[in-house]
Image (cartoon, grey):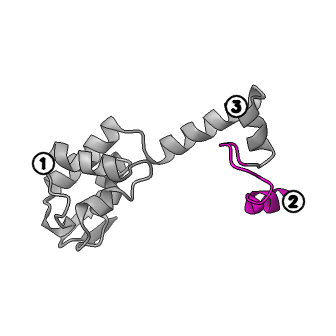
Amino acid sequence: MYVRMLHQTVSFNILKRFQISSYIINTIAIRMVLRHIKEVYGIGDYTAKHICKILGISPKARIRNLNGHLKNRTARYIQQNYIVNNVLKKKVKRNILQQVAISSYRGKRHSNRLPCHGQRTRTNAKTQKRIRRI
């Protein structure tokens, strides 16, 4: 199966090779690189700027101006050097389950669906309490 993207045909098998390359290649051509990199789960503003600096890409450059080599290089760099997407989500979930298993204070707060970072609950955290009631 093939898809027409950015005036070229790219095979889905190539996209499956890298977990995040679909974020880099499947895109609206007019977006800025910095904004697009920040859409990857686990990469924020500082990290996106750092990636652009390391790879020598201008953060204000447009995706349509990058060639396929730079897109693949960016995807490969992110995958090799950062924990992103589903791997990061699984890691966070595993850490929370570990806290619940050892019955730590934070684990108990997580299991009761209460805020666990020191926020007050008398007047705030209404949403958390409402979700718990259901």
Name, please, the residue furthest toward the right.
133
The answer for how far apart the CA atoms under marks 2 and 1 are is 51 Å
Regarding residue 12, the answer to whether it shows in the image is no
Does residue 119 sit above or below 29 in this rendering? above
Label 1, residues with CA under 10 Å away: few <14, some 14-19, many ≥20: few
Does residue 20 sit above or below 83 in this rendering? below
Q: Which residue is mark 1?
A: 56
Q: Main secondary structure of the magenta part?
A: loop
Q: What residue sits 29% from the left and 58% below the top?
A: 24
Amino acid type, label 3: Gln
Amino acid type, label 1: Gly
Q: What residue sits 32% from the left and 36% below the top?
A: 81
The answer for how far apart the CA atoms under marks 3 and 1 are is 41 Å
- Where residue 111 sits, quadrant-wise, is top right
Label 2, residues with CA under 10 Å away: few <14, some 14-19, many ≥20: few
Question: 122 left or right of 89?
Answer: right
Q: Quadrant of the N terminus?
A: bottom left
Question: 97 left or right of 123?
Answer: left
Tell me the SS state at disc 2. Answer: helix
Dots 2, 1 in contact, CB < 8 A: no
Q: Which stretch did the figure color magenta?
A: 115-134
Q: Nearer the viewer, residue 74 or 35?
A: 35
Tell me the SS state at disc 3. Answer: helix
Q: Position of residue 80 (x, y in %)?
A: 31, 36
Q: Position of residue 131 (x, y in %)?
A: 79, 60
Q: Which residue is mark 2?
A: 133
Amino acid type, label 2: Arg
Whether residue 126 appears in magenta in the rendering, the answer is yes
